[in-house]
Amino acid sequence: MNKFRKKLNEIPLTVKVSTSYAICSILQKGLSFITLPLFTRLLTTEQYGQYTIYTSWSGILMIFLTLNLAYGSFSTAMVKYETRRNEYISAIQGICLLLSAVFLIIYLPFRNVWNQLFELPTIFVLLMISEIIFSTATTLWMGKNRFEYKYKSVVAVTLLTAIISPVLAYILVCTVDQKGYARIVGYAGINILVGIIFFILNVKRGKRLYNKKFWKYAFGFNVPLLAYYLSQVIFNQSDRIMISHITGTSDAAMYGVAYNLAMILTFILNAINGSYVPWLYGKIKDHNAEENKTISLILVILMGLMVLCVIWYAPEIIVIMAGKNYEAAIYVVAPVAMSLLLLFYCQLFINIEFYYEEKKMLVYGSVGAAVLNVVLNAVLIPAFGFVAAGYTTFISYIVFALSNFYTMRLVLKKRKLPDNMYNYKALLIIFILFMISGFLGVTLYASLVARVIITLIVFGLLVLNRNKFIDALGEIKGR
């Protein structure tokens, strides 16, 4: 036991921190995934749609009421104001309170009109505003603790909230008739209660809600990025809101379940990118960026194969995780999951844009793709139903990927740097093959046996070539 403790103490703090957060994230996502079948069976599709609409609007209002100040400028502020972190956090909470008060002044006199847009009663809009304010306080506290390597407290609060929220939601759903709203209260209630504690703690430590210097810095940094943040939320949430208004909350629930399942690998994408970026930036700094050609292709293939597994077994995943009432949603999974691979392509190009601090064009590309998504939804959802929203997302991500590809090459050209980091032809061929394979899986949805046989053949080929993938991953980690 002492030997184990000694080895544990010898592990570098940065490794402990990153490992703890990774495990915490996986457990958090896992709990969310595990409880999904429970609630999709307890709630009707219309009731589940109420929860879907609430979370969608919450994501959009979060941008306006907080300016994403718990993200965006936060990291740089923690470095810039290292000795005044508590004061900065308290001032940010003051901004959130001010913006929320402005929204209430606009909302309350015309709440009946707003409620028709939100498809929620007044009490739940007020609950949403409260959750946004107090969950932001928790996020700010966690962000500061991450910078100070106080990872144990962050992990404890994250896991405790992730466990208690579904338990409370389950109790409420089982005891009241309005089950959709009960689930909202279960999740939002815990976020508010925990957030109130950290809100008070942050203010107590920081003393003041207003600080001219900090407010000026925060507004100056994040306001120009609002269009980008909002466009990303529109990508993720507008489909469900528009489906709810056009074809009903039941269809919004169908789409929401399929979308969440199709995007289940997002945390893996983020984990891969988190390890890959430091390696890539090191290679660029050392003028060895050409080594990225092979590594990026292998990562794309790995990500593509995982996404294909989700697409090929969508019927079984949907039935197991959501029940037969959601079977109609299986045809949404393929285009949305393909969008995830496109998002990975986008990230490859965005990494280069960020390295050279070129963000302006990123905003233009993301806003353009988001607007296209909304326009296509308005035209195609009434004509083809909620499944069309999956394909509008796919088309919009194609545009977003192309815009980032163009921007990245423009950045390199502007700086007169060699464009030798990616094998564009190979990336295109892989995506075309991936797309064909994905739609082949859709045509085989009626035959599980055929899908299993093909999967086993592909798996056998991967085992034979496993050393190539292991060596590539080892090179990234070894940087």
Image (tube, rainbow, N blue to C red):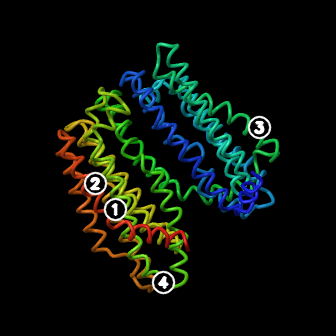
Which mark is on residue 255? none
Nearer the observer, disc 4 or disc 2? 4
Residue 135 rendering spot, x and y as whole percentages: 63, 39
Mark 1 element type: helix
Nearer the observer, disc 4 or disc 1? 1
Q: Name the residue under label 3.
A: 200
Q: Name the residue under label 2.
A: 395
Q: Are marks 4 and 1 in contact (CB under 8 Å)?
A: no
Residue 148 rendering spot, x and y as whole percentages: 74, 56
Q: Which of marks 3 and 2 is nearer the N terminus?
A: 3
Residue 308 rendering spot, x and y as whole percentages: 30, 52
Residue 377 in sight in this render: no
Mark 4, residues whose alpha carbon is within 10 Å: few (<14), some, or many (≥20)? Answer: some
Residue type of the residue flagged with mark 4: Asn
Vertical placement of 39 versus 227: above or below? above
Nearer the observer, disc 3 or disc 1? 1
Distance between the alpha carbons at the discs numbered 4 and 2: 34 Å
Quadrant of the drawing holding the C terminus: bottom right
Mark 1, residues whose alpha carbon is within 10 Å: few (<14), some, or many (≥20)? Answer: few
68 displayed left or right of 259: right
Q: Which of marks 3 and 4 is nearer the N terminus?
A: 3
Mark 2, residues whose alpha carbon is within 10 Å: few (<14), some, or many (≥20)? Answer: many
Q: Name the residue under label 1.
A: 463
Residue type of the residue flagged with mark 1: Val
Q: Residue 295 lies in what quarter of the image?
A: bottom left
Distance between the alpha carbons at the discs numbered 3 and 2: 45 Å
Vertical placement of 26 versus 130: above or below? below
